[in-house]
Image (cartoon, grey):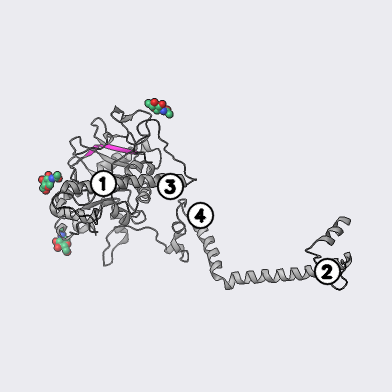
Amino acid sequence: MLGFRTWLKQSPVICPYTDSASGKNPTINSCWTKFLRQSRLFYGAALMIGFMLVLSTMFVNEHNFKDAFVNKLSGSLKDSVKEPCFLTKTHCSRGGAEALPRGIIVETSDLQFRSLSYEEESEVAESMPKNLLAMAVGIKQKKDVDEIVQKFPLTNYTIMLFHYDGVVDQWQDLPWSNQSIHIVGLHQTKWWFAKRFMHPDIIAQYNYVFLWDEDLGVEHFHADKYLEVMEAEGLEISQPALDPASADIHHALTRRQSSGRAHKMILRNRGSTICTRESNGPPCTGYVEVMAPVFSRAAWRCVWYMIQNDLVHGWGIDFKIGYCAQGVRSEKVGIIDAEYILHKGIPSLGGPRLNKTLEQEDVEKTFVKGKKHSPGKQSDLRREVRKRSGSEMLAFLRRWKTAAKRDHTWKDPYKVLNDSSGNYHRVR
Ligand SMILES: *[C@@H]1O[C@H](CO)[C@@H](O)[C@H](O)[C@H]1NC(C)=O
Ligand SMILES: *[C@@H]1O[C@H](CO)[C@@H](O)[C@H](O)[C@H]1NC(C)=O
Ligand SMILES: *[C@@H]1O[C@H](CO)[C@@H](O)[C@H](O)[C@H]1NC(C)=O
Ligand SMILES: *[C@@H]1O[C@H](CO)[C@@H](O)[C@H](O)[C@H]1NC(C)=O
C-alpha cells in the first residue's frame, strides 16, 4: 500500500501539479480525490468520443461502412465459389457486382450465335460446339485456311478468325464463313488477338482450344481423332507432331515419331542438347511450339494470364508453357503423332507473311515503327522482325525471373535438373 501511495504521489499523470495555492506537494488524500474526479471526467470523455466515433463510422463515414460490409459480403461469396480465389481482388469479389442477387450474375460467356426471333434455348445449348479453333489469318492464305477449317466439323468446333489484313468480305463465299466469328485488327499478331478476345471467362464453354497459325498442312490431321488421343493420353497441352518434311523444325521433340500415337519426351545426346531419362524440362520434355498449340480449358486460363500485353510475338512463352500443365509437366504436355501436320514455313509470324512488297509494307508498319527501309530489302526487314521477336523473348524471360524473385510465396514446381534443360535459354 505504501508503494502504491508513493507511486501515486510521484505519478505525473495522476498528480501532475503541485498545489498552486500553497505551493506545497498535495497530500495523498487530496491527490486521490483529484484522481477520482479526473478519471470520472476522463471516462466520460472517452465514452463520448467512442460514441461519436461509432456514429461517424455508421452514418457520417458511410463509405467505410460500405467497404466493411462489401468485404464481408465478398468474403462469403468467395467461400461459396468452387474454385479457390488467389488472383486479384476484382476477380475474387466478382468485380463490383456484390449488390446483385447471386442468381442474376452470369460470370462467363460463349461465342454462340443466337437467333433474333424466339428459339428453344435447350436446342441452342445442345448444339453448342464443345471446342474452339482460333486462327490469325490473311486473305492470301485463304486456300490453306479453308483446308484447315474443313478438318474441324462445325457441329463440334466454333471457328474464330482474326483478320490481321482487314479483309473479311472475301471469305464470305466459303460455306462455313457465315457461321464463324470474324474479328478485325489491322496488323496484329495471333497473341495480341488471343489476349484480347479469348479471355477464359468468355470462352469458358469450350473443352479444348486450338490456337493455330495459318501455314499448316492438314492432310494427315482430323480434329476429332486428335482430341480423342489427347484425352486418352491425359494431356492438358499438346500439339500435332510435325511432319519431318516440314520447313523448319526448331526442336527435335516436336518432330513426328512414327512408332506411336503420342510422345512426351525425347532422348538425345547430340550438339548442345542433352536429354536423358531424368530430364524434366524443355527442350527434352514439357514443351510445345507456339505455331499449333492445343489447350484444355484449365491450361488455357493459365496461359492467358501468362501472355503479356506488349509482347505481341509470343516468343518465350513456349519455354514456360509447361508451367500451365496442371500437374507433372512431363506427363501432361505432349506431341501427338497419330494426327500430324506439315509446317509450311511461310514466315507469317502469327501475322503478315513477308513475301511480297505489299505484305512487306504491312509488316513494316506493324513491327518496325519509325524505321525506314529501302523497298525490296526483304531480308533486312525479316531481320528486324526477328530482332524484335528475339528481344521480346528475352524481355519475357527476364520478367519471369524478376517475378519469381519478388514473389516470396512462389516455389518453382519444376526445378530443372543438371542437363541441357538447365541452361536452356538462361537469362541474366
Ligand atoms: C463430335 O464429337 C463427338 C464426340 O465428342 C463425335 O462422336 C462426333 O462424331 C463428332 N461430330 C462430328 C461431326 O465429327
Ligand atoms: C454469307 O452471307 C452473305 C451476306 O448475307 C451472303 O452474301 C453470302 O452468300 C453468304 N455465304 C454463304 C456461303 O452462304
Ligand atoms: C512467296 O510467294 C510465292 C507465291 O505466293 C511462293 O511461290 C513462294 O514460295 C513464296 N516465297 C517464300 C520465301 O515464302
Ligand atoms: C552437371 O553435369 C556436368 C556434365 O554432365 C558435370 O560436369 C557437372 O559436375 C554436373 N553438375 C552438378 C552440379 O551435378
- Helix, strand or loop at mark 2: helix
Q: Determine if the magenta segment contains residue 338.
A: yes
Q: Is residue 197 above or below residue 271?
A: below
Report the Cα–Cα distance between label 1 and label 4: 47 Å
Residue type marked 1:
Lys
Quadrant for the C terminus in the image: top left
Main secondary structure of the magenta stretch: strand
Which quadrant of the figure has residue 48?
Answer: bottom right
Residue name at image x 85 percent, y 66 percent: 31
Report the Cα–Cα distance between label 3 and label 4: 28 Å
| CB-based contact (under 8 Å), mark 4 and mark 2 | no
Q: How many marks?
A: 4
Using the image as rendered, state which of residue 233 and residue 349 is in the foreground.
349
Residue 78: % across, % down: 49, 56
Q: Determine if the magenta segment contains residue 239.
A: no
Q: Earlier in the sequence, mark 3 or mark 4?
A: 4
Report the Cα–Cα distance between label 3 and label 2: 62 Å
Q: Earlier in the sequence, mark 1 or mark 2?
A: 2
Residue type marked 4:
Asp
Q: Which mark is residue 34?
A: 2
Determine which residue is flagged by label 4.
79
Q: Earlier in the sequence, mark 3 or mark 1?
A: 1
Q: Which mark is residue 403?
A: 3
Q: Earlier in the sequence, mark 1 or mark 4?
A: 4
| CB-based contact (under 8 Å), mark 1 and mark 2 | no
Residue 358: % across, % down: 14, 55
Q: Residues within 10 Å of mark 4 (few under 14, many from 20)?
A: few
Residue 196: % across, % down: 32, 56
